[in-house]
Image (cartoon, helix red, strand yellow):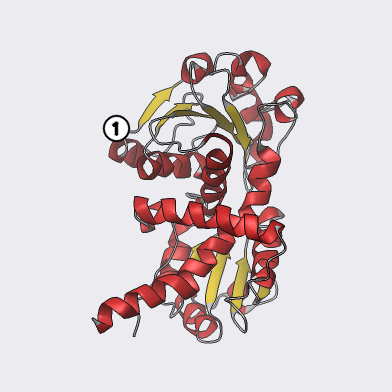
Amino acid sequence: MSQIRHFLTLMDFSPDELKALIGRAIEMKKNFIAGEIYEPLKNKTLAMIFEKSSTRTRVSFEAGMNQLGGHAMFLSSRDTQLGRGEPIEDSARVISSMVDAVMIRTFGHDIVENFAAHSSVPVINALTDDFHPCQLLADMMTYVEHRGSIEGKTAAYVGDGNNMCHSWMNAAKQFGFHLNIACPKGYEPKAELMKGLSDHVTLFHDINEAVKGVDLVTTDVWASMGQEEEQKIREKAFKAFKVDSKVMALANKDALFMHCLPAHREEEVSAAVLEGPQSVVWDEAENRLHAQKALLEALVVAMPKQIDLKEAS
Protein backbone atom coordinates (compact mmCIF):
# COMPACT_ATOMS: atom_id res chain seq x y z
CA MET A 1 0.00 0.00 0.00
CA SER A 2 1.39 3.39 -0.95
CA GLN A 3 2.15 6.04 1.63
CA ILE A 4 -0.29 8.98 1.59
CA ARG A 5 1.19 12.43 1.04
CA HIS A 6 -0.60 15.56 2.20
CA PHE A 7 0.00 19.25 1.43
CA LEU A 8 -0.79 21.23 4.56
CA THR A 9 2.17 23.63 4.41
CA LEU A 10 5.09 24.16 2.03
CA MET A 11 7.21 22.21 4.50
CA ASP A 12 5.43 18.97 3.53
CA PHE A 13 7.42 18.88 0.27
CA SER A 14 11.19 19.04 -0.08
CA PRO A 15 12.78 22.04 -1.86
CA ASP A 16 13.54 19.83 -4.86
CA GLU A 17 9.94 18.57 -4.98
CA LEU A 18 8.63 22.14 -4.84
CA LYS A 19 10.91 23.28 -7.66
CA ALA A 20 9.83 20.30 -9.76
CA LEU A 21 6.20 21.13 -9.02
CA ILE A 22 6.66 24.73 -10.23
CA GLY A 23 8.33 23.49 -13.40
CA ARG A 24 5.52 21.04 -13.99
CA ALA A 25 2.90 23.77 -13.43
CA ILE A 26 4.54 25.99 -16.05
CA GLU A 27 4.65 23.05 -18.48
CA MET A 28 0.98 22.22 -17.85
CA LYS A 29 0.01 25.86 -18.43
CA LYS A 30 1.82 25.93 -21.78
CA ASN A 31 0.20 22.67 -22.84
CA PHE A 32 -3.24 23.91 -21.81
CA ILE A 33 -2.82 27.15 -23.79
CA ALA A 34 -1.73 25.03 -26.78
CA GLY A 35 -5.02 23.14 -26.53
CA GLU A 36 -3.64 19.83 -25.31
CA ILE A 37 -6.16 17.56 -23.60
CA TYR A 38 -4.62 15.78 -20.61
CA GLU A 39 -6.85 13.78 -18.28
CA PRO A 40 -4.83 11.77 -15.74
CA LEU A 41 -7.58 12.19 -13.13
CA LYS A 42 -10.39 10.73 -15.24
CA ASN A 43 -12.99 9.13 -12.93
CA LYS A 44 -11.28 10.73 -9.90
CA THR A 45 -13.14 12.94 -7.43
CA LEU A 46 -11.91 15.84 -5.32
CA ALA A 47 -14.01 16.75 -2.27
CA MET A 48 -13.81 20.51 -1.67
CA ILE A 49 -14.72 21.41 1.92
CA PHE A 50 -15.38 25.11 2.45
CA GLU A 51 -15.88 26.63 5.90
CA LYS A 52 -14.54 29.96 4.59
CA SER A 53 -15.90 31.59 1.46
CA SER A 54 -13.77 31.81 -1.67
CA THR A 55 -13.57 32.95 -5.27
CA ARG A 56 -10.13 31.98 -6.61
CA THR A 57 -9.82 28.78 -4.59
CA ARG A 58 -13.14 27.28 -5.64
CA VAL A 59 -12.90 28.31 -9.30
CA SER A 60 -9.29 27.16 -9.68
CA PHE A 61 -9.73 23.75 -8.02
CA GLU A 62 -13.06 23.04 -9.70
CA ALA A 63 -11.84 24.10 -13.16
CA GLY A 64 -8.53 22.31 -12.58
CA MET A 65 -10.18 18.98 -11.75
CA ASN A 66 -12.40 19.33 -14.82
CA GLN A 67 -9.40 20.03 -17.07
CA LEU A 68 -7.64 16.97 -15.64
CA GLY A 69 -10.67 14.81 -16.47
CA GLY A 70 -11.96 14.52 -12.91
CA HIS A 71 -14.81 15.89 -10.84
CA ALA A 72 -14.82 18.40 -7.99
CA MET A 73 -17.51 18.14 -5.33
CA PHE A 74 -18.38 21.32 -3.37
CA LEU A 75 -19.17 20.74 0.31
CA SER A 76 -20.01 23.59 2.67
CA SER A 77 -20.37 23.34 6.44
CA ARG A 78 -23.97 24.54 5.99
CA ASP A 79 -24.91 21.54 3.85
CA THR A 80 -23.07 18.70 5.60
CA GLN A 81 -22.69 17.13 9.03
CA LEU A 82 -19.41 19.05 9.37
CA GLY A 83 -21.43 22.07 10.42
CA ARG A 84 -23.62 20.07 12.78
CA GLY A 85 -21.03 18.78 15.21
CA GLU A 86 -19.78 15.56 13.61
CA PRO A 87 -16.21 14.94 14.83
CA ILE A 88 -13.51 15.81 12.27
CA GLU A 89 -12.09 12.30 12.60
CA ASP A 90 -15.40 10.70 11.61
CA SER A 91 -15.90 13.05 8.66
CA ALA A 92 -12.35 12.36 7.47
CA ARG A 93 -12.80 8.60 7.57
CA VAL A 94 -16.12 8.68 5.73
CA ILE A 95 -15.38 11.34 3.09
CA SER A 96 -11.94 9.97 2.25
CA SER A 97 -13.41 6.48 1.72
CA MET A 98 -15.48 7.84 -1.18
CA VAL A 99 -13.14 10.28 -2.97
CA ASP A 100 -9.56 10.43 -4.26
CA ALA A 101 -8.42 13.67 -2.60
CA VAL A 102 -9.77 16.29 -0.20
CA MET A 103 -9.27 20.06 -0.29
CA ILE A 104 -10.13 22.02 2.88
CA ARG A 105 -10.52 25.77 3.38
CA THR A 106 -11.19 26.45 7.05
CA PHE A 107 -10.23 28.37 10.19
CA GLY A 108 -7.95 26.55 12.66
CA HIS A 109 -4.92 24.81 11.18
CA ASP A 110 -5.49 21.97 13.65
CA ILE A 111 -8.65 21.10 11.67
CA VAL A 112 -6.74 20.19 8.49
CA GLU A 113 -4.06 18.40 10.53
CA ASN A 114 -6.70 16.32 12.32
CA PHE A 115 -8.53 15.60 9.09
CA ALA A 116 -5.32 14.53 7.35
CA ALA A 117 -4.37 12.26 10.26
CA HIS A 118 -7.59 10.27 9.74
CA SER A 119 -7.84 10.49 5.94
CA SER A 120 -7.10 7.59 3.60
CA VAL A 121 -6.45 9.98 0.67
CA PRO A 122 -4.29 13.11 0.16
CA VAL A 123 -5.48 16.27 1.92
CA ILE A 124 -4.72 19.78 0.60
CA ASN A 125 -4.79 22.89 2.76
CA ALA A 126 -6.60 25.51 0.68
CA LEU A 127 -6.25 28.09 3.49
CA THR A 128 -6.33 28.10 7.27
CA ASP A 129 -5.83 30.92 9.75
CA ASP A 130 -2.13 30.00 9.86
CA PHE A 131 -1.10 29.05 6.32
CA HIS A 132 -2.06 29.41 2.64
CA PRO A 133 0.48 27.21 0.79
CA CYS A 134 -1.46 26.88 -2.49
CA GLN A 135 -1.24 30.64 -2.98
CA LEU A 136 2.55 30.48 -2.60
CA LEU A 137 2.80 27.82 -5.30
CA ALA A 138 1.10 30.26 -7.67
CA ASP A 139 3.31 33.13 -6.44
CA MET A 140 6.54 31.20 -6.94
CA MET A 141 5.35 30.02 -10.36
CA THR A 142 4.60 33.61 -11.35
CA TYR A 143 8.02 34.85 -10.26
CA VAL A 144 9.77 32.09 -12.22
CA GLU A 145 7.72 32.89 -15.34
CA HIS A 146 8.64 36.57 -15.19
CA ARG A 147 12.14 36.62 -13.70
CA GLY A 148 13.52 33.09 -13.48
CA SER A 149 14.69 31.48 -10.25
CA ILE A 150 13.94 33.34 -7.01
CA GLU A 151 16.86 31.64 -5.25
CA GLY A 152 19.21 34.21 -3.72
CA LYS A 153 16.76 37.08 -4.23
CA THR A 154 15.08 39.26 -1.59
CA ALA A 155 11.33 39.72 -1.24
CA ALA A 156 9.37 42.07 1.01
CA TYR A 157 6.04 41.16 2.58
CA VAL A 158 4.12 44.22 3.80
CA GLY A 159 1.19 43.95 6.21
CA ASP A 160 -0.28 41.70 8.84
CA GLY A 161 1.71 38.74 10.18
CA ASN A 162 -1.06 36.41 9.03
CA ASN A 163 -1.42 33.16 7.09
CA MET A 164 0.01 34.73 3.94
CA CYS A 165 2.99 36.09 5.84
CA HIS A 166 3.61 32.69 7.44
CA SER A 167 3.53 30.94 4.06
CA TRP A 168 5.89 33.53 2.56
CA MET A 169 8.24 32.77 5.47
CA ASN A 170 8.12 29.05 4.69
CA ALA A 171 8.67 29.83 1.01
CA ALA A 172 11.82 31.81 1.82
CA LYS A 173 13.35 28.71 3.38
CA GLN A 174 12.09 26.22 0.81
CA PHE A 175 12.91 28.28 -2.29
CA GLY A 176 16.14 29.81 -0.99
CA PHE A 177 15.43 33.56 -0.84
CA HIS A 178 15.36 36.15 1.94
CA LEU A 179 12.13 37.71 3.18
CA ASN A 180 11.83 41.17 4.73
CA ILE A 181 8.62 41.59 6.71
CA ALA A 182 7.20 45.07 7.32
CA CYS A 183 4.35 45.24 9.83
CA PRO A 184 3.10 47.53 12.62
CA LYS A 185 4.08 46.66 16.19
CA GLY A 186 1.63 44.17 17.63
CA TYR A 187 0.91 42.56 14.26
CA GLU A 188 4.05 40.45 13.88
CA PRO A 189 4.00 36.84 12.61
CA LYS A 190 4.07 33.99 15.12
CA ALA A 191 7.16 34.12 17.31
CA GLU A 192 7.95 30.41 16.98
CA LEU A 193 7.99 30.71 13.19
CA MET A 194 10.23 33.77 13.37
CA LYS A 195 12.63 31.87 15.60
CA GLY A 196 12.68 28.77 13.41
CA LEU A 197 13.19 30.72 10.19
CA SER A 198 15.46 33.47 11.50
CA ASP A 199 18.15 32.76 8.87
CA HIS A 200 15.68 33.53 6.08
CA VAL A 201 13.55 36.33 7.55
CA THR A 202 14.15 39.87 8.82
CA LEU A 203 11.45 41.82 10.66
CA PHE A 204 10.94 45.57 10.18
CA HIS A 205 8.45 48.06 11.55
CA ASP A 206 9.33 50.55 8.80
CA ILE A 207 8.02 49.84 5.30
CA ASN A 208 10.70 51.95 3.62
CA GLU A 209 13.53 50.02 5.22
CA ALA A 210 11.94 46.69 4.35
CA VAL A 211 11.50 47.36 0.63
CA LYS A 212 14.87 48.95 -0.13
CA GLY A 213 16.52 47.09 -3.01
CA VAL A 214 14.18 44.10 -2.98
CA ASP A 215 13.25 42.04 -6.03
CA LEU A 216 9.60 41.53 -5.15
CA VAL A 217 7.01 43.32 -3.01
CA THR A 218 3.85 41.59 -1.84
CA THR A 219 1.02 42.54 0.48
CA ASP A 220 -2.39 41.42 1.73
CA VAL A 221 -5.59 43.00 3.04
CA TRP A 222 -5.35 44.60 6.48
CA ALA A 223 -8.35 42.73 7.88
CA SER A 224 -8.72 39.10 6.82
CA MET A 225 -11.90 37.01 6.92
CA GLY A 226 -13.16 36.90 10.50
CA GLN A 227 -11.47 40.20 11.39
CA GLU A 228 -14.04 42.55 9.83
CA GLU A 229 -14.97 44.02 13.20
CA GLU A 230 -11.34 45.16 13.56
CA GLN A 231 -11.37 47.05 10.25
CA LYS A 232 -11.33 50.60 11.70
CA ILE A 233 -8.67 49.73 14.29
CA ARG A 234 -6.51 48.10 11.65
CA GLU A 235 -6.90 51.01 9.24
CA LYS A 236 -5.22 53.23 11.83
CA ALA A 237 -2.54 50.67 12.72
CA PHE A 238 -1.60 49.96 9.08
CA LYS A 239 -1.91 53.49 7.72
CA ALA A 240 1.86 53.76 7.17
CA PHE A 241 2.03 50.34 5.44
CA LYS A 242 0.36 51.08 2.12
CA VAL A 243 2.25 49.96 -0.97
CA ASP A 244 2.18 52.90 -3.36
CA SER A 245 4.42 54.20 -6.14
CA LYS A 246 6.83 55.84 -3.67
CA VAL A 247 7.29 52.53 -1.87
CA MET A 248 7.81 50.61 -5.12
CA ALA A 249 10.42 53.19 -6.19
CA LEU A 250 12.58 52.04 -3.26
CA ALA A 251 12.67 48.47 -4.57
CA ASN A 252 14.80 47.33 -7.51
CA LYS A 253 13.74 48.81 -10.85
CA ASP A 254 12.58 45.44 -12.13
CA ALA A 255 10.88 44.41 -8.86
CA LEU A 256 7.53 42.68 -9.21
CA PHE A 257 4.41 43.45 -7.20
CA MET A 258 2.14 40.65 -5.98
CA HIS A 259 -1.13 40.43 -4.06
CA CYS A 260 -3.09 37.27 -3.29
CA LEU A 261 -6.40 39.14 -3.85
CA PRO A 262 -9.02 40.33 -3.21
CA ALA A 263 -7.38 43.77 -3.04
CA HIS A 264 -8.72 46.92 -1.40
CA ARG A 265 -7.50 49.72 -3.61
CA GLU A 266 -6.14 52.73 -1.71
CA GLU A 267 -5.89 50.73 1.51
CA GLU A 268 -3.03 48.20 1.46
CA VAL A 269 -2.14 49.07 -2.15
CA SER A 270 -2.69 52.01 -4.46
CA ALA A 271 -4.61 51.52 -7.68
CA ALA A 272 -1.56 52.83 -9.56
CA VAL A 273 0.59 49.98 -8.25
CA LEU A 274 -2.06 47.27 -8.54
CA GLU A 275 -2.74 48.18 -12.17
CA GLY A 276 0.81 49.28 -12.93
CA PRO A 277 3.57 47.73 -15.06
CA GLN A 278 5.28 46.01 -12.11
CA SER A 279 2.09 44.24 -11.02
CA VAL A 280 1.70 40.56 -11.90
CA VAL A 281 -1.41 39.99 -9.76
CA TRP A 282 -3.60 38.78 -12.65
CA ASP A 283 -1.01 36.23 -13.78
CA GLU A 284 -0.62 35.25 -10.14
CA ALA A 285 -4.37 34.66 -9.78
CA GLU A 286 -4.57 32.65 -13.02
CA ASN A 287 -1.61 30.55 -11.93
CA ARG A 288 -3.58 29.19 -8.97
CA LEU A 289 -5.29 26.99 -11.59
CA HIS A 290 -2.12 25.53 -13.08
CA ALA A 291 -0.09 25.26 -9.86
CA GLN A 292 -2.92 23.33 -8.23
CA LYS A 293 -3.30 21.06 -11.25
CA ALA A 294 0.37 20.15 -10.86
CA LEU A 295 -0.22 19.59 -7.13
CA LEU A 296 -3.22 17.33 -7.75
CA GLU A 297 -1.30 15.36 -10.35
CA ALA A 298 1.60 14.93 -7.93
CA LEU A 299 -0.51 13.86 -4.96
CA VAL A 300 -2.99 11.60 -6.75
CA VAL A 301 -0.91 10.18 -9.63
CA ALA A 302 2.84 10.80 -9.54
CA MET A 303 3.87 10.53 -5.89
CA PRO A 304 1.92 7.33 -5.10
CA LYS A 305 3.53 5.67 -8.14
CA GLN A 306 7.00 6.76 -7.02
CA ILE A 307 6.40 5.41 -3.52
CA ASP A 308 5.03 2.12 -4.88
CA LEU A 309 8.16 1.71 -7.00
CA LYS A 310 10.37 2.27 -3.95
CA GLU A 311 8.39 -0.30 -1.94
CA ALA A 312 8.61 -2.82 -4.76
CA SER A 313 12.37 -2.48 -5.14
Q: Residue 217 location, x and y as percent?
A: 56, 28
Q: Residue 57 location, x and y as percent?
A: 65, 57
Which quarter of the figure is the C terminus placed in?
Answer: bottom left
In front: 17, or 207?
17
**Badge 1 amino acid:** Asp
In front: 124, or 17?
17
In what element is the residue under mark 1? loop
Residue in view at x 66 percent, y 76 percent? 69
Whether residue 199 is visible here, answered yes or no, is yes
12 displayed left or right of 56: left
Residue in view at x 47 percent, y 20 percent? 210
Res 293 → quadrant:
bottom right
Residue in view at x 63 percent, y 71 percent? 38
Q: Which residue carries the number 1 mark?
A: 199
In front: 78, or 242?
242
Whether residue 289 is visible here, answered yes or no, is no
Q: Residues within 10 Å of mark 1 (few under 14, many from 20)?
A: few
As displayed, is residue 79 above or below residue 109?
Answer: below
As displayed, is residue 5 above or below residue 94?
Answer: above
Which quarter of the figure is the N terminus placed in?
Answer: bottom left
Find the residue positioned furthest to the left.
313
